[in-house]
Amino acid sequence: MQKLPFKEKIGYGVGAVGLDLSYGLFYSYLSIYLTDALGITPWFLLILTPLARIWDGINDPMMGSIVDVSHNKMGKYRPWILRGAILNAIVLILMFNTPAGIAGSKAVYAYVALFYVLWGMTNTLADIPYWSMIPSFANEEKDRNLISTIARTFSGLGQGIIGILTVPMVAILSRSKESSLENMSSNDIQKGLGSWAAICAVLLVAFAVICVASTKERNVIQAGEKFSLKKAIGVIKNNDQLLVFMLFAMISNAGYYMTSGISNYYFKSVTGVWGNQSIFFTLGAVGSVLGLLVIPVCSKFNLTNRSTYKISLSLAAAGYIGMAIVGYGFGGNVFGLGVCYMVASIGIGSMFVNQTVMLSDIVDYGEYKLGTRNQSLTFSMKGFLQKMAYTIQSIIMYASFGITKYQVVTGNQVVQQTAMSKSAISALMFIVPPLFILISLAIFSKKYKIHGQFKTEILEAIAQKREAENE
């Protein structure tokens, strides 16, 4: 394989920054925008989220299959990255800038539902081809680890920007003299998040342009068949390791999303100091960066990806359990919580890199078992499982809000939540994440089999197939 120039590695990674700016805003801050700025009831969101996933179950594999059979002068993946980024940027702006004329009316629910679904569709347009490029860069495990680590590094940077800067930027961009992080009104949240979303949307497009302009597609295998939903479903259903991966990755990701989503409510409504979330996420960002060193360090000790993944999930579980101890036993000290979250983020950061590498291995396994290389279709499951993980998190969170009568707000209202709501928020913050991580670890350990001699057998079979095709 030709060695990738440093410029191209960086250019590819930059694309992940923009994707995760949009991704982070949607998964971490849309909920609080809808409940604490627009006054959307949790029961409506409890219904909307799974309905949107039903459509994603059709749309995501459909998009993956379309990418698999597409090609033009710019290549197979890069045109879709650019188109998707532009459309996702437009939807992001409109989603966080609800027209003032429909606020408080029934129309706002239709508006939210429309752009909630459109965000998922346009994100898929860019996300699937972006991550699908990794196997085309490299065939060897170490090379794939490197490319995946670079992409996850920049992805973590995008998430770090959102986690650290969003709350302060909301306060600055709201331009309200009465606005404060501790006592911010609904109008302030809406105005500030709307302006911040517009800035992130511009950066999303800019980084996508850099990514597309600075990369070249290599080792791309073109599929000649047209898209068939029936065939796509069959490919997914018959790839048993893809289904196993979907299950354990979805559960672990749901634990991570629970922390990133509920922390807004924990610091704003339980501790009463929303600004502390920036401290919490700053320490988490440090952990995410350190997490990128886990694979290289483990490689020096000749540990397999399987062992590294187990270490990653164990670190995540330990960090989340530490958060529970600090949250319930030490009054939720923000620095104590932050240090524990840093440990959890080391594991989570490494976990995401490992999951990306696993998908590359699952592409190989699919070709080995089924005879066809469904690269983009397989990688489309990455975005879909993340959406499903978010759905699990949302169902649990919104159901808890509905049962405990969480008070949504609009206009210039500022309300105090009930003791029951605060207890539910704390439980979601401290109990659910470690539980999900441990369940995921158990499933992975028992069911995932692409490792060791079997993995070597897969790669050798594919290499022989390539040689036969080139003769």
Image (cartoon, rainbow, N blue to C red):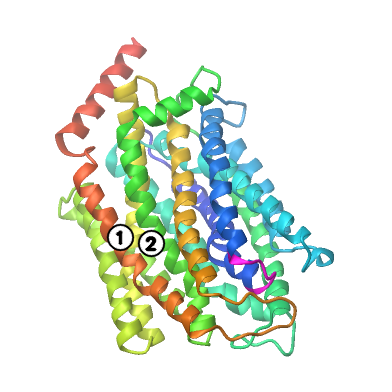
Residue drawn at (48%, 39%), measured in percent from left and top? 380
* In magenta segment, residue 337: no
Name the residue that disc number 2 marks: 255
Q: Amino acid at mark 2?
A: Gly
Tag 2 near tag 1, CB within 8 Å: yes
Query: Which residues fall within the magenta stretch?
Result: 36-42
The quarter of the picture where residue 3 lies is: top left
Name the quarter where the N terminus is drawn: top left
Magenta stretch secondary structure, dominant: loop
Q: Amino acid at mark 1?
A: Ile
Q: Tag 1's secondary structure?
A: helix
Residue drawn at (70%, 50%), measured in percent from left and top? 114
The quarter of the picture where residue 204 lies is: bottom right
Q: Do we see residue 146 in this rendering?
A: no
Position of 127 relative to 221 (above/below): below
**Residue most extreme to the right:** 101
From mark 2 to mark 1, how far is it between C-alphas? 6 Å
**Residue most extreme to the top:** 471
- The disc label shown at residue 437, or none: 1
Q: Could you say where residue 222 lies in the image, as x and y percent from the top left?
A: 49, 22
Residue drawn at (36%, 54%), measured in percent from left and top? 251
Give the left or right position of residue 107, taking residue 23 as reference. right
The quarter of the picture where residue 213 lies is: top right
Q: Do we see residue 95 in this rendering?
A: yes
Q: Could you say where residue 427 lies in the image, as x and y percent from the top left?
A: 39, 74
Position of 79 relative to 159 (above/below): above
300 or 79: nearer the viewer: 79
